[in-house]
Image (tube, helix red, strand yellow):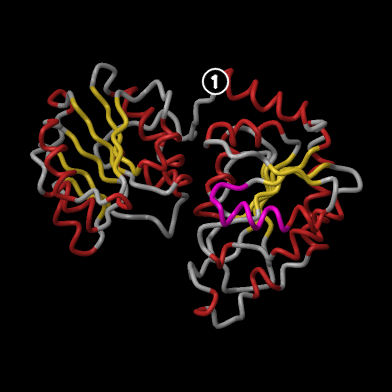
Amino acid sequence: MHFNKDKVNKILVIKPGAIGDVLLSTPVIENLRYHFPHAEINFLTQSYCREVLTENPYLSRILTYDIGKGDSSWCLLKNINKQNYDLIIDLFGNPRTAILVFNSDAKYKVGFRFKWRALAYNIKVTPRGNMVHNVEFNLDALRALGMEIITSQPKIFLNRVHFEFAKRFFSGNSLDPAKTIGFNPSGTWQTKVWYKDKWIELGRKFSTEYKILLFWGYEEERKLALEIKAGIGENAVLIPEVNLKYIAALINKCRLFVSNDTGPMHLSWVTGTNTAAIFGPTNSNLQGPLSSNSIVIKNEKLTCLGCNLTRIEDCPNRHRCMKDLSVQYVFDKISEFINLKK
């Protein structure tokens, strides 16, 4: 289908989740605003990802839904149709989002060629998910429309309140930003998570010179963080229960942030924080940090990295990507990195 940008006044971008994936889609918003300076540009995501997008100056509205509270595709469809969009860009392409786009009245429907879901779109994008970084994968939707890409930098917008909170927290807990390392030991997939005893040992090694600030998001993550804090000892501190942007501000206050492949890892490098990302079942070339002050740590001896298995019991190699990733190796890599970034 021929795309006429002069016919576009109202745009919807769809990316339900997760937090890191929504963050990596933000360059699409900024590029759209460049090409459509006067258009209404809205973004549809799940409610738990909303904070990634608040205060984004390139967006008009953030639309959210919550599957856990019974929001149905039918309700979403009715709401989307009422908005009379000219252009809908589906960056997710699962059955729910494909059906939403297919049944909408938008003139231009952009999405990826994922099996039968490709039928939902009249402008189809060849997916390069196994070839390019997730940021570029998202931007391919705009390239399919013939648009010039003017930025590929993801962004989250923090304000003075977030930074002042982080400053007060550090001061109140006697944390020196130059001597504080953030640990994020949790993850959405069990296969992405480095083991608790390894985090404890790593924390003990660093706690002779640094304070360890432990991050968490959900209750189960808090329990894990508390166990690791107890194992490290008095030089470990837990962050309080705060929303995403306060977490980002706390991360940004640290000398270094060490994390599994999760949303907070992306918050770290996107906000310019020194980042050490531990990878195993996911491909760091496709989902890893892109900043120059980041490193990826992984078990280079294995050929099965990037398998994308989500359950440990499905791994034929006993989860060696994490089990055999030694604390000493991670410690040495991070220590070398910190010295380079002095």
- Picture coordinates of residue 93, whole percent (x, y): 27, 53
SS assignment for the magenta stretch, majority: helix
- 226 falls in the magenta region: yes
Residue that carries the numbered disc 1 in the rendered image: 159
Name the residue at 73% across, 35% down.
Answer: 254
* Front one among 294 and 240: 240
Q: What type is the residue that disc 1 sits on?
A: Asn
Specify the farthest residue to the right. Answer: 208
Name the residue at 25% across, 41% down.
Answer: 89
**Circle 1: element type:** loop
- 342 falls in the magenta region: no
- Picture coordinates of residue 126, whole percent (x, y): 28, 54
* Front one among 41 and 74: 74
**Residue 161, quarter of picture:** top right
- Picture coordinates of residue 186, whole percent (x, y): 60, 56
Q: Is residue 157 left or right of residue 254?
A: left
Q: Is residue 13 above or below residue 325?
A: above
* Number of marks drawn: 1
Q: Is residue 277 above or below residue 253?
A: below
Name the residue at 34% across, 22% down.
Answer: 34
Magenta residues (range): 216-227
- Picture coordinates of residue 122, whole percent (x, y): 13, 47
Name the residue at 75% across, 30% down.
Answer: 170
* Front one among 39 and 132: 39
Q: Is residue 218 left or right of residue 209?
A: left
**Residue 291, quarter of picture:** top right
